[in-house]
C-alpha cells in the first residue's frame, strides 16, 4: 500500500494533448468539428438556405416573429428626425417643411413614408441578414419636393452567383465588384425579385447609388448573416415539440370515458350508430365515449 502511494507521488503527470480543453480530441469532442472556411466562403455556400429558413420561421413561428418585431422596435424607435442648426429662423422653417414634404415622397414604391422605410430596412436586415437601398435620382418633371427616392431591395436581389475577375483587374465576389484597393465599385442587382420567377440578368449599379446595410461580425465580411441563424435549429425543434405536445394533449382531452360491452359484432368506434338527431357518430371528438369490446373465451 505504501509502495503504491509512493509510485503515484513520483509518477510524471500525463501531458495534455492541448493547453485548452476545447482544443483536445477526446471522446467528448470527436463530433465537434466546425467548418474552417472564411466567413465569405461559408456565406456564399449557405446564405440562401439560412435566409429561406429564417424567413420561413418568421412566417410560421410566433416566437421568431416577436423577436424580429422587438429588435426592429428597439433599433428604430421613433426614427431619424434631423433638425437644422442654421441660424436663420426663416431658412430653418423652410428646410424643415421641405424635409417633411420629402419624407412622404421618399419611397419609390409609394407605400411607406421615410419613417416606415426605416422600419422596413431594419426588418429586412435582421430577417435576411442584409438589405439594399438604391438611391433613385428623379427628373425635374416628376414634380417631387426633392428629386430623390429610395428603393428598398431584399438580399435576394443581389446576384450571389456572379463571381469573376474583370479585364480592368476588378474582382466580382458574391455579386459585389471590388477594385484593386478592395473598395466597392458596384453591385450586380436583379431588376425583379428572383422569387417572382422572372430572374433575368443582373445589372451593374455603381456603389455610390447603393446603400448596403448589414452587420459585419468578422473582418473582411462582405455579406450579411441572418440574425436568427444561431437559434433557428432550436426554434424549429421547440416548434415541433410544442406542436406534438399540443396534439397529444388535444387527443387525450377528447376521451371522456370508456364503455365496455361483450358484442364483438358492433363497430368499435360507433360509426353505424346515430345520436338523437340522426347524425352518425364517427371519429374522435371532444367528450367522446369510446366503446371497448371484451373478448371472452
Image: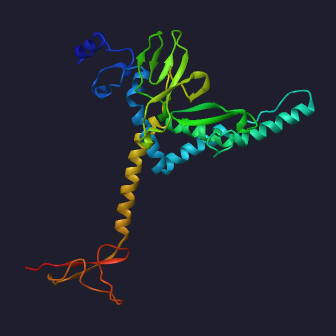
In the rendered view, would you say 83 is above or below 167? below
The residue most toward the left is 297
| Residue 286 in the image: above or below residue 143 | below
Q: Say whether residue 271 is left or right of residue 211.
A: left
x, y (%) of residue 13? 31, 12
Q: Quadrant of the N terminus?
A: top left
Residue 248, given in percent of the width and then of the height, sits at 35, 61
Judge whether 84 appears above or below 124 on screen.
Answer: above
Specify whether residue 5 is in view.
yes
Of 129 and 243, which appears nearest the observer? 129
Query: For this view, does 172 lie left or right of residue 125?
Result: left
Q: Position of residue 207 (x, y in %)?
A: 57, 22
- Which residue is at a point 45% across and 45% down the rendered structure image? 57
73 relative to 16 in the view: left or right: right
- Could you tell me residue 285's position as x and y percent? 35, 74
Q: Is residue 220 visible?
A: no
Amino acid at each position: 500500500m505504501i509502495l503504491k502511494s509512493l509510485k503515484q507521488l513520483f509518477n510524471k503527470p500525463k501531458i495534455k494533448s492541448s493547453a485548452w480543453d476545447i482544443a483536445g480530441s477526446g471522446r467528448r469532442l470527436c463530433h465537434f468539428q466546425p467548418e474552417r472556411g472564411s466567413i465569405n466562403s461559408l456565406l456564399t455556400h449557405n446564405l440562401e438556405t439560412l435566409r429561406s429558413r429564417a424567413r420561413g420561421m418568421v412566417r410560421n413561428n410566433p416566437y421568431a416573429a416577436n423577436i424580429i418585431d422587438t429588435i426592429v422596435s428597439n433599433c428604430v424607435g421613433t426614427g431619424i428626425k434631423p433638425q437644422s442648426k442654421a441660424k436663420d429662423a426663416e431658412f430653418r422653417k423652410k428646410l424643415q417643411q421641405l424635409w417633411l414634404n420629402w419624407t412622404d415622397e421618399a419611397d419609390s414604391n409609394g407605400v411607406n413614408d421615410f419613417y416606415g422605410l426605416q422600419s422596413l430596412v431594419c426588418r429586412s436586415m435582421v430577417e435576411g441578414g442584409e438589405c439594399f437601398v438604391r438611391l433613385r435620382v428623379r427628373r425635374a418633371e416628376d414634380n417631387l419636393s426633392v428629386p430623390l427616392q429610395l428603393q428598398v431591395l431584399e438580399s435576394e436581389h443581389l446576384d450571389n452567383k456572379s463571381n469573376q475577375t474583370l479585364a480592368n483587374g476588378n474582382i466580382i465576389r458574391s455579386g459585389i465588384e471590388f477594385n484593386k484597393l478592395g473598395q466597392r465599385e458596384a453591385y450586380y442587382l436583379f431588376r425583379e425579385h428572383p422569387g417572382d420567377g422572372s430572374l433575368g440578368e443582373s445589372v451593374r449599379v455603381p456603389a455610390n447609388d447603393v446603400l448596403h446595410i448589414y452587420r459585419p461580425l468578422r473582418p473582411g465580411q462582405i455579406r450579411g448573416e441572418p440574425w436568427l441563424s444561431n437559434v433557428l435549429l432550436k426554434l424549429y425543434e421547440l416548434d415541433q415539440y410544442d406542436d406534438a405536445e399540443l396534439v397529444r394533449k388535444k387527443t387525450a382531452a377528447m376521451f371522456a370515458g370508456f364503455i365496455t360491452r361483450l358484442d364483438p359484432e358492433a363497430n368499435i368506434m360507433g360509426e353505424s350508430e346515430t345520436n338523437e338527431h340522426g347524425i352518425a357518430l364517427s371519429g374522435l371528438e371532444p367528450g367522446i365515449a369510446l366503446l371497448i369490446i371484451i373478448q371472452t373465451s
